[in-house]
Image (cartoon, helix red, strand yellow):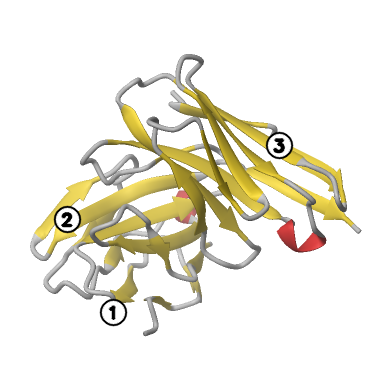
Amino acid sequence: QQQVKQSPQSLIVQKGGISIINCAYENTAFDYFPWYQQFPGKGPALLIAIRPDVSEKKEGRFTISFNKSAKQFSLHIMDSQPGDSATYFCAASIQFDRKLIWGLGTSLAVNP
Amino acid sequence: NAGVTQTPKFRILKIGQSMTLQCTQDMNHNYMYWYRQDPGMGLKLIYYSVGAGITDKGEVPNGYNVSRSTTEDFPLRLELAAPSQTSVYFCASSGQEETQYFGPGTRLLVL
């Protein structure tokens, strides 16, 4: 049973466009929602994270939108660049539990 | 500060052989994790540790063992390698904050 459902599986965006990746969860005890970025041949690295007490968090071109009532959160990449081409994973965890529950990933390709 | 290091980078094993994947972190993190990553399947937690001497099973522990004798090291042992253990293995660590820092991975092929 996939506790964190991520979509789409793959995404192709033109340079300068907006990339949107969505995640949905069931467990209302989740209280930490990070997004990780992974380049080919590398380990994942934290991109941005949010807690349920805010509905949006922005860091540069990357924004997390969080909808607690719908149990959904999404990653928006503004002005997408070819260097953003990577696999993106959403995840979630319960307070004080350091184990992350991962989505299956989204492969993003940004065409020049 | 090297972060999380893993050795080897790549290994080919024959069915039934055993090996140890090494993981070391120099950030004095209490929490350490072992994941396997298969194409399209995301990251699956194999084992984790909350401190030296304390380990616990994750989602897919069968066929693996771990130990944590020091804060820095968290080796993963494969006994009787099987083709189903062909994967990319990542070690990660985290400290006071919840961010997990990943190593570069070990690619394992079992033939």
Q: Is residue A22 above or below residue A64?
A: above
Residue type, label 2: Val
Left or right: residue A39 compared with residue A56? right
**What SS does tag 2 mark?**
strand
Q: Which residue is mark 2?
A: B50
Q: Which residue is mark 3?
A: A20
Figure quadrant of residue B96:
bottom left
Left or right: residue A46 compared with residue A14? left
How many neighbours does mark 3 have within 10 angstroms: few (below 14), some (14-19), or many (20 or more)? some
Q: Is residue A14 above or below residue A46?
A: above
User: Which dot, 1 or 3, sits closer to the camera?
Assistant: 3
Question: Are labels 3 and 2 on one chain?
Answer: no
C-alpha separation, residue under disc 1 versus residue under disc 3: 35 Å
**What SS does tag 1 mark?**
loop
Residue type, label 3: Ile
Q: Position of residue A28 (x, y in %)?
A: 34, 20
User: Which dot, 3 or 2, sits closer to the camera?
Assistant: 3
C-alpha separation, residue under disc 3 versus residue under disc 2: 34 Å
Q: Position of residue A88 (x, y in %)?
A: 61, 48
Left or right: residue A32 compared with residue A57? left
Q: Position of residue A73 (x, y in %)?
A: 54, 30
Viewer-side residue, B72 vs A64: A64
Q: Which mark is residue B26?
A: 1
